[in-house]
């Protein structure tokens, strides 16, 4: 899937996840806070309880939407950072394979465009995703001012998550019979081809 399509798909999903988690947690806390603030003046009549629950639901919904929008935007921004880093690593590895050197880092005009595009596609594997995970974890640790021990743990979690996500992507590419950087042919196609070659060899031996 092209990078722009992946980003357009990932950002709304990240926003939806952040909005759902943020609004659910904030709404629950707002309901508890409303109940605590009004514990000394609970209603005694049925219309009073109706207005009480109506006010509590409004208070809960307002707090949930506000916090959900904030969390959704925050998570979407970090998802964008992750995918930008992953794409940058893919492009860097691809241009490096195509002949880019440390002495010629200013541009890629000297490279063959066809070869460069092919090498970039070959570089799209779980290694780039793992690097993106650990770098994103480091940036998050710096943003949150984590101590060294917590930052190292966050970066390890980012590495594990990035590798898992990258392997999942590679597995889907295998199933869709597309090329992956470290292997150009899915395992089941190789197995079927080997079986067919073996059958052809046996038939040729029988005829001879």
Image (tube, rainbow, N blue to C red):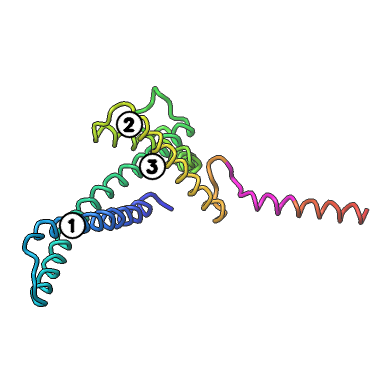
Looking at the image, is mark 2 or mark 3 nearer the viewer?
2
Q: Is residue 84 left or right of residue 203?
A: left
Crowd rating for badge 3 (residues with CA inside 10 Å; few <14, some 14–19, many 20+): some
Q: Earlier in the sequence, mark 2 or mark 3?
A: 3
What's the mark number on residue 150? Answer: 2
Q: Residue at x 32, y 46 (%)?
A: 79
Mark 1 touches mark 3? (CB < 8 Å) = no
Relative image position of residue 194 (x, y in whole percent):
74, 50
Q: Is residue 58 left or right of residue 68?
A: left
Between marks 1 and 3, how big is the CA–CA gap?
44 Å
- Name the foreground residue: 123 vs 102: 123
Q: Earlier in the sequence, mark 1 or mark 3?
A: 1
- Residue pointed to by mark 1: 32
Looking at the image, is mark 2 or mark 1 nearer the viewer?
1
Q: Up-down: is 157 above or below 195?
A: above
Relative image position of residue 115 (x, y in whole percent):
49, 39
- Name the foreground residue: 196 vs 83: 83
């Amino acid at each position: 899937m092209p990078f722009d399509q992946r980003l357009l798909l990932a950002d709304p999903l990240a926003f939806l996840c952040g909005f759902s988690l943020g609004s659910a947690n904030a709404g629950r806390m707002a309901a508890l806070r409303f109940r605590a603030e009004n514990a000394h003046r609970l209603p005694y009549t049925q219309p009073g309880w109706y207005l009480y629950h109506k006010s509590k639901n409004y208070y809960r919904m307002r707090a949930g939407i506000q916090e959900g929008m904030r969390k959704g935007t925050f998570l979407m921004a970090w998802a964008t950072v992750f995918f930008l880093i992953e794409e940058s690593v893919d492009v860097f590895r691809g241009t490096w394979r195509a002949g880019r050197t440390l002495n010629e880092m200013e541009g890629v005009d000297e490279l063959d465009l066809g070869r460069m595009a092919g090498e970039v596609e070959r570089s799209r594997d779980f290694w780039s995703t793992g690097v993106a995970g650990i770098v994103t974890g480091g940036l998050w640790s710096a943003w949150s001012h984590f101590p060294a021990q917590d930052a190292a743990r966050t970066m390890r979690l980012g590495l594990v998550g990035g590798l898992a996500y990258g392997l999942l992507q590679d597995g889907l590419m295998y199933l869709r019979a597309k090329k992956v950087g470290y292997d150009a042919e899915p395992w089941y196609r190789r197995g079927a081809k080997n079986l067919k070659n073996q059958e052809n060899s046996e038939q040729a031996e029988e005829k001879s």
